[in-house]
Amino acid sequence: LRITQIFLAYLFMFNLRVHTLATLMLAAVFSACLTLLSGCSDKKKLTLTSPDGTLQVQLNLDAKGRAFYTVLKNGQTLLNPSQLGLKLNTGEFVEQLTLTDVQANTVKDNYRLVAGKRRDNTYLANEKIISLKNAQGKKLAFALRVSIDAVAFHYRIFADSHQEQSLQTELTQFALPA
């Protein structure tokens, strides 16, 4: 797998009317802008909230520098703390990660459906690109988006010039409550 930038996207949607995890989809690519994330004073913990304030994602770095995310709906846990991480042939993004930058944005998109209950629709979400680096100084960006009824994220790995990279192991977890 020859890449200079790798995009791994996870999109999972919640059927909020019955408060169950309705769909888990692996999606391809997002745009490069990302989101309105309210940060905590602790640089190892970030919180991103949906535009209506009901859906929340918390991103934490533990004492070992491992990244975890948690998803809550109205304060109730939908996904328990779940680890994030990748191992590449050129380095690992599992432990000893440090936060280097956070960029926030609000996303608004109007679109029209050919069929459905509502023809004209508006998509509104808060997004954030969270930049991390590993112990060797290699960079990883974690792009996170939260809309009124969905959470999505993907990884961005940046290569040194024309260096070949291959994904060895992906450690992304989805820890559902019992």
Image (cartoon, grey):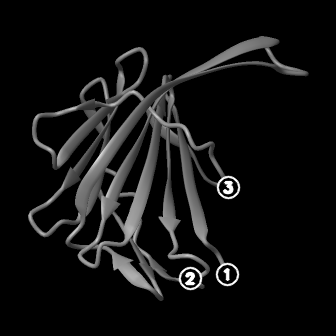
Image quarter where the N terminus lies is: bottom right
Is residue 23 in view from this perspective?
yes
On the question of residue 80 being in view, the answer is: no
Residue at the bottom extreme, as displayed: 89
- Amino acid on which the number 2 mark rests in the picture: Gln
The earlier-in-sequence mark between 2 and 3 is: 3
Instruction: Give the side of residue 62 with respect to residue 8, left or right.
Output: left
Work out how far the residue at label 2 is from the one at label 3, CA to CA, in angstroms: 18 Å
Q: Nearer the viewer, mark 2 or mark 3?
A: 2
Residue receiving disc 2: 165
Classify mark 3: residues with Cα within 10 Å, few (<14), some (14-19) or many (20+): few
> Circle 2: is it few (<14), some (14-19), or many (20+) Cα within 10 Å?
many
Q: Residue at x 27, y 56 (%)?
A: 68
Comes first in the chain, label 1 or label 3? 1
Q: Real-space Cα distance between discs 2 and 1?
A: 6 Å
| First in sequence: mark 2 vs mark 1 | 1
Quarter location, residue 110: top right
Measured in 3D between alpha carbons, the distance from the residue under mark 1 to the one under mark 3, in whole angstroms, is 16 Å
Crowd rating for badge 1 (residues with CA inside 10 Å; few <14, some 14–19, many 20+)? few
The residue lying at 15 percent from left, 45 percent from top is: 43
Secondary element type, mark 1? loop
Contact (CB < 8 A) between labels 2 and 1? Answer: yes
Q: Nearer the viewer, mark 1 or mark 3?
A: 1
Instruction: Name the residue at 8% across, 64% down.
Output: 63
* Mark identifier at residue 28: 3
Number of callouts: 3
Q: Is residue 87 above or below residue 149?
A: below
Pinpoint residue 163: horizontal percent, then vertical percent. 57, 83
Task: Quadrant for residue 53, please give it.
Answer: top left
**Amino acid type, callout 3:** Ala
The disc placed on residue 2 is 1
